[in-house]
Amino acid sequence: MTGRTSSSTFPTSVGAFDTTQNGSFDAFVTKLNPAGSSLLYSTFLGGSSFDEGFGIALDAGGDAYVTGHTSSLNFPTSVGAFDTSQNGSDDAFVTKLALAPAATLTLSPKAAANTVGTTHCVTATV
């Protein structure tokens, strides 16, 4: 889901694009579990002024495409973006966000070094 918030305590998740409120209103992007009872991903999205998310769609890989508008001169953009500067009092934006947390590897049992001949299990969490 997407929208706008003026709350500095809006819930964000580990691995979020941005965990702090930046302006009077920031857009947000939030993903809940299928039951709607747990936060899977949540981030602020915006610059130092007014930003609002209006629409959201997912691609086959689970990445989110968020549309909205911004009046922030410093709305976050990426290298190679179609347009990286504000061109009026309000600009539209389209942002792609990877909503899946980064994969992690866990070594069990935990060890500072893996001695030759010692059995360990490596678990990948994606």
Image (cartoon, grey):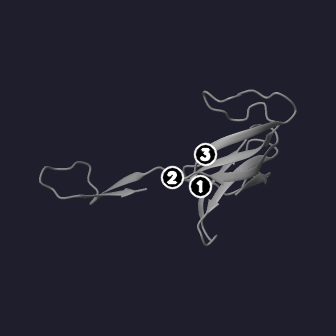
State the residue position of label 3: 97
Label 3, label 2: how many angstroms apart (C-alpha)? 11 Å
Most foreground residue, 75 or 117: 75
Most foreground residue, 23 or 85: 85
Label 1, label 2: how many angstroms apart (C-alpha)? 9 Å
Decide: few, some or many residues near mark 1? Use Cα within 10 Å; few <14, some 14-19, many ≥20: some
Rendered position, 122 above or below 76: below
State the residue position of label 1: 13
Q: Quadrant of residue 125?
A: bottom left
- Answer with left or right where residue 6 lies relative to residue 45: right
Secondary structure beneath dot 1 equals loop
Decide: few, some or many residues near mark 2? Use Cα within 10 Å; few <14, some 14-19, many ≥20: some
- Figure label count: 3
Q: Residue lying furthest front in this view?
A: 60
- What is the x, y in percent for residue 80? 61, 27
Rendered position, 16 above or below 83: below
| Mark with earlier residue (1, 2) | 1
Q: Are marks 1 and 2 in contact (CB under 8 Å)?
A: yes
- What is the x, y in percent for residue 102? 47, 49
Query: Disc 3 residue type?
Result: Leu
- What is the x, y in percent for residue 25? 80, 47
Secondary structure beneath dot 2 equals loop
Which dot, 3 or 1, sits closer to the camera? 3
Q: Which quadrant, please, contains the C terminus? A: bottom left
| Mark with earlier residue (3, 1) | 1
Query: Disc 2 residue type?
Result: Pro
Q: Are marks 3 and 1 in contact (CB under 8 Å)?
A: no
Identify which residue is drawn at 74% across, 51% down: 55
Query: Disc 1 residue type?
Result: Ser
Label 3, label 1: how many angstroms apart (C-alpha)? 14 Å
State the residue position of label 2: 101
